[in-house]
Image (cartoon, rainbow, N blue to C red):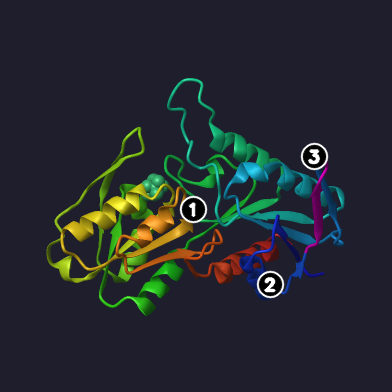
Amino acid sequence: MNSLVFDFPTSSPLGDEIRELMGADKGKVVLRYFPDGETYLRVESHVKNRDVIINTSLFHPNDMFLNLFFLADTLRLQGAKTIGLLAPYLAYMRQDKVFLPGEALTSVTFAKLLSQYFSYLITVEPHLHRYHSLAEIYSIPTIVVKAAPLITKWIRKNVTDPFLIGPDEESNQWVKEIAAEFPYIILKKIRHKDGRVEITWPEIGNLKNKVPVLVDDIISSGETMFQAVQYLKNHGMKAPFCIVIHPIFGRESYQKLQTMGVKAIVSCNSIPHPSNQIDLSPLLAREIIKFLRINA
Ligand code: R5P
């Protein structure tokens, strides 16, 4: 029987692409609220013995966390064979250490909860900093899709004579892969407690005449990109392309970046956003199909 992909809580173009590529059906769920804010949820699709996937964006996770568990648990009670969580953007990866006594280690608590309700997790370039892999905190199988091949393809097609810039040491992991065929530099970044960012640049030398392409996993407050773009501007370099895997763009940062004279702002569609130009669905669908075949 075909797999079922639920888009939750709302439809997404990524979900449509994935269903198409997997030959999967669209899961139907009714979600509404009682006057006191409690959730009413009803699964309308036939899920018994089927591989079910919930496609959700964990962007603003707190808003839908509980509903996600209600849905997963309902699918389990109705006899779904597997319940996969497709979360192209995986939230709660920041707090990977207790920095101050009493702080919540949210990455671990979140992972424990998800691991209880899902058979497996598939995501794109999670923010791994102190953890080397998701297996350190998730007890279910995790599939990590790398956006690098798609970003490389986009740059090859759209940028002439690029050089890549990773704005901090963490970006080395994906910039290195994208840059297999382009020159690149990695910057050093210090983030102050008030959110300000300070960046140290290496010698750029003869890269100066090439087209700068800034690549980061997340644009959140935008501070990192603002600083990097401003530096390029101050040093008379060409207008940069800004490429991001997860376009969070908090605090009007997208609007601000647009006014800074950048050539283009491009993102992957892990979070729906006007800057989406790089479609992750072929890689995600391929990995889900592979996982389900191996675990059939
Ligand atoms: C840093 O660890 C990440 O790779 C990003 O550079 C960072 O999260 C971007 O954050 P913001 O947009 O707030 O500077």
Please state which of the two labelled residues, at mark 3 or mark 2, is closer to the viewer.
Answer: 3
Disc number lying in front (1 or 2): 1
Q: Quadrant of residue 196?
A: top left
Q: In the image, what residue occupies the spot 36% across and 77% down?
A: 158
Counting from the top left corner in percent of width and height, residue 224 is at 33, 49
Q: Position of residue 50 (x, y in %)?
A: 81, 61
Residue under pointer 2: 22
Q: Nearer the viewer, residue 88 or 144?
A: 88
Q: Callout 3: helix, strand or loop?
A: loop
Give the quadrant of the N terminus. Answer: bottom right
**Residue 86, labelled with which disc?**
none
The percent coordinates of residue 2 (x first, y second) are 78, 70
Tell me what residue is drawn at x 51 percent, y 21 percent. Answer: 102
Residue under pointer 3:
38
| Residue of label 1 | 248
What amino acid is at disc 3? Glu
Q: Is residue 130 above or below residue 31?
A: above
Q: Is residue 124 left or right of residue 257?
A: right
Whether the residue carrying mark 1 lies under 8 Å from ligand 1 is answered with yes
Q: Is residue 27 above or below residue 72?
A: below
User: Which badge, 1 or 2, is on the more N-terminal residue?
Assistant: 2
| Amino acid type, mark 2 | Met
What amino acid is at disc 1? Ile
State which region is magenta.
27-37
**Residue 161 part of the magenta-drawn span:** no
Q: Where does residue 7 sit, x and y in percent of width and height?
A: 70, 60
